[in-house]
Amino acid sequence: MMDMNMNIQLNILSNCVASVNDPELIVTLCSISHFSLTHTSKPSSHIPNLMASLCRRRTRAPQKKTSIFNNDDIVCQKCNSGKSPTKLLLCDNCNKGYHLFCLTSVPKSSWFCPSCSHNTNTKYVRKKRKRGSRWVSSKKKWNLLPFVPSADSMRRLEQMASLVNALAATKAEFSNALTYMPGMAPRNANSTALEDGGGGIQVLSKEGTKALNLCTDMMERGECPPLMVVYDPLEGYTVEADKPIEALTIIAEYVGDVDYLKNREDDEVNNSMMTLLYASDPSQSLIICPDKRSNIARFISGINNHTREGKKKQNVKSARFNVNGEFRVLLIAKRYIPKGERLYYDYNGSENAYPTKHFV
């Protein structure tokens, strides 16, 4: 019976993750779903093609440059690859190319690469000291709830496969915790004692800590939040609720590599960074960089907070908490979210330093 169930799961897995002939993708999904590779003798032989769905259009402007995509000399400036030439977006000034799946924002009209743009329209704004926090400050005590995973294990595999799809497109590894890599900020740099005016930071309550730990334990068992990563031709990869979510439910923790802000001030290609710590000494301020390691939080969309319609879309809040003396950023359901609704939060958080006028 166990072998039969395993075969069924493998069939679902094969249907969810289409063929790339790359066993690393199946390893990624297995690590997310707590699925043992010991049950598969030749995992790569059953992987269908995933890359056909990785196309993500980065601009709503007319596609005028498709005729020159056949130039074999054009390579992506981020990954240095000339593969997938039809997925290259060219700078309107210098004609240098970037793969659509190597970028993570959606410019509304003409697009300029980081080298040519002095006022980029991507999510990351080059600022020396001030940048969008992407989380809100609140002294209100929140009674947080753990997410409730889908009961059907096959559906959970489909949800996790949709995440693998998006991670593969952005060439990122799955991680469900903040990572401290050699050459970046050490873990002891993430201390609430270093925060500028840190006395007002909300300490995660005992009940909230219990809920967060339960979410972590469920993820380790392969019980993921009921979310589906869905590709949209205008917004790119988005996240939708796959079952109803109650208000104040923990959606996910915003994770990635922790680095000093000073090391990333010129990193305009990586535009999904989240402020983690505003230090009294600006050289000690920290950010979360999800470009190499991340989870589903990276793909949750931002609202256009310049329009009434955009503000109405917000159903998720981002908030920093003091958890055992360290900062953690959580994405939390702002209200009841019905099944099928797309998730949005305010990338500006407490400030207005983040450009969202071009957001759909």
Image (tube, helix red, strand yellow):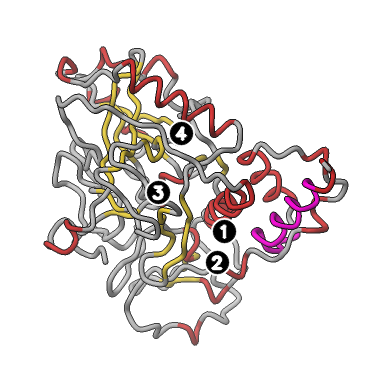
Q: What residue type is labelled 2?
A: Val
Mark 4 or mark 2, which is nearer to you? 4
Residue occupying image coordinates x 52% and y 46%: 150
Q: Are marks 4 and 1 in contact (CB under 8 Å)?
A: no
Taking depth in this image into account, of 257 and 140 the one nearest to the observer is: 140
- Label 1 secondary element: loop
Going from N to C along the chain, the mark reached first, 3 or 1, is 1
Q: Label 3 neighbourhood size at 10 Å, few (<14), some (14-19), many (20+)? A: many
Taking depth in this image into account, of 316 and 83 the one nearest to the observer is: 316
Q: Name the residue under label 2.
A: 75
Assign the N terminus to one quadrant of the image.
top right
Mark 3 or mark 1, which is nearer to you? 3
Range shown magenta: 5-21
Q: Which mark is residue 295?
A: none
Q: Name the residue under label 4.
A: 257
Q: Are marks 3 and 1 in contact (CB under 8 Å)?
A: no
Instruction: From the image, give the main secondary structure of the stretch colored magenta.
Output: helix
Q: Name the residue under label 1.
A: 80
Q: Mark 3 points at which residue?
A: 270
